[in-house]
Image (cartoon, rainbow, N blue to C red):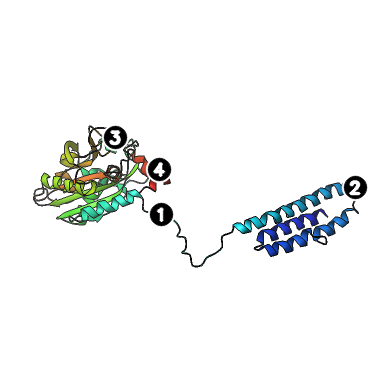
């Protein structure tokens, strides 16, 4: 009897859930709760049970009857709430995603440089020490080669190319591009870089775009003109750039590239330095780097520059992003704004 009631309850509730119209519900009500229904037939058998068993089975009988009755009473309300299908109405389009803001920035940067003859290339993220440091005129004791600054890969060393690293900059593409093609060279290399640093303007993984131009009679005015063109195209005509003397092993002379800060409009804030934000480094390609790429420095000169994509994008006019880490926080409320 216990199993019979349980099966009846399960069967009744399943049929009520699947019912799609009021007439079907009335037939189920008659079948289970009617005077000659399934539960009425079971009620006749209760009188023949022993007193102790009758109490337990009686409680189960009442639970089954209540469950079926409640389901039958609530189902019509659910049916009335179901929307009627109108085949003439247009379909509801599913929500569509969009490209990440960093991807948008990379596409825009590529487009700007392609308009002035730069060719987009891509070189390895997992790189040999030779291309990441040695060929770029960085000595063995240079701080950038310390394990506190660079991610080294646990892999066998190459007798000529050295250790394996996660490339800390896209400058590894400079000598690779010189090996691949000969002057005139005008490349833009965009890829991921890795460094052991993280704050409002740095992340351990970031994207960088590297420009390299090599030809006869290339000088600093060509570098400044290229940087100015990019700043006006990407940031807007009101933004300004400057080259600030600095030191890099692979360029001589070397500069840091600054652009006026959009967060404070050049007045000075927590993100910038007295109204200027550092975007990256630049300079004339060092003769030793040209020699590493099998190019004669007495015949050719060149300039190079490297800037972080995220740092560049966060200073785009109107965005006012004051923490680079927001771009990789995966907060949909933030990303949906772009």
- Sequence-wise first label, 1 or 3: 1
Q: Circle 3 sits on which residue?
A: 271
Q: Earlier in the sequence, mark 4 or mark 3?
A: 3
Q: CA distance from mark 3 to mark 2?
A: 83 Å
The residue that disc 4 covers is 329
CA gap between label 4 and label 1 equals 17 Å
Name the residue nearer the viewer: 133 or 305: 305
Percent across and percent down for residue 59 are 81, 48
- Quadrant of the image occupied by residue 16: bottom right
Q: Are marks 2 and 1 in contact (CB under 8 Å)?
A: no
Are there few (<14), some (14-19), or many (20+) residues within 10 Å of tag 2?
Answer: few
Q: In which image quadrant can residue 137 be found?
A: top left
Q: Could you say where residue 233 lies in the image, as x and y percent from the top left?
A: 21, 49
| Residue that carries the numbered disc 1 in the rendered image | 97
- Determine contact: label 1, label 3, CB under 8 Å: no
Q: CA distance from mark 4 to mark 2?
A: 67 Å
Q: Are marks 4 and 3 in contact (CB under 8 Å)?
A: no
- Give the mark nearer the N terminus: 2 vs 1: 2
Nearest to the eye among marks 3 and 2: give it.
2
As drawn, the label of residue 51 is 2
Residue 154 placement (x, y as % from top left): 38, 44
Disc 3 crowd rating (10 Å Cα; few below 14, some 14-19, many 20+) is some
Q: Which-is-in-front pick, marks 4 and 2?
A: 2
- Horizontal side, residue 80 vs residue 206: left or right: right
Secondary structure type for disc 4: loop
């Amino acid at each position: 009897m216990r199993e019979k009631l349980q099966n009846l309850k399960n069967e009744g509730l399943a049929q009520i859930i699947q019912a799609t119209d009021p007439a079907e519900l009335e037939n189920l009500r008659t079948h289970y709760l009617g005077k000659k229904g399934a539960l009425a037939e079971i009620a006749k058998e209760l009188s023949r049970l022993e007193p102790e068993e009758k109490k337990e089975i009686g409680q189960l009988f009442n639970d089954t009857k209540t469950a079926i009755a409640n389901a039958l009473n609530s189902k019509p309300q659910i049916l009335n709430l179901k929307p009627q299908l109108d085949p003439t109405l247009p379909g509801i389009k599913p929500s569509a995603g969009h490209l990440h803001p960093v991807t948008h920035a990379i596409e825009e940067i590529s487009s700007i440089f392609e308009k002035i003859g730069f060719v987009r290339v891509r070189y390895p993220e997992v790189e040999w020490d030779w291309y990441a440091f040695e060929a770029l005129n960085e000595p063995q004791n240079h701080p950038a080669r310390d394990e506190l600054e660079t991610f080294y890969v646990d892999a066998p060393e190459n007798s000529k190319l050295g250790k394996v690293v996660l490339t800390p900059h896209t400058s590894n593409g400079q000598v690779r591009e010189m090996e691949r093609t000969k002057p005139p060279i005008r490349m833009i290399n965009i890829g991921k870089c890795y460094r052991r640093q993280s704050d409002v303007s740095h992340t351990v993984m970031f994207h960088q775009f590297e420009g390299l131009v090599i030809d006869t009679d290339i000088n600093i005015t060509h570098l400044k003109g290229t940087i100015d063109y990019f700043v006006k195209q990407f940031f807007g005509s009101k933004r300004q750039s400057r080259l600030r003397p600095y030191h890099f092993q692979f360029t001589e002379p070397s500069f840091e590239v600054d652009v006026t800060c959009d967060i404070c409009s050049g007045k000075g804030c927590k993100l910038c330095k007295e109204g200027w934000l550092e975007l990256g480094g630049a300079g004339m390609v060092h003769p030793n780097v040209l020699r590493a790429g099998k190019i004669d420095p007495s015949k050719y000169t060149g300039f190079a520059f490297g800037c972080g994509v995220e740092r560049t994008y966060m200073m785009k006019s109107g965005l006012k992003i004051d923490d680079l880490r927001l771009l990789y926080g995966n907060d949909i409320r933030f990303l949906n704004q772009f």
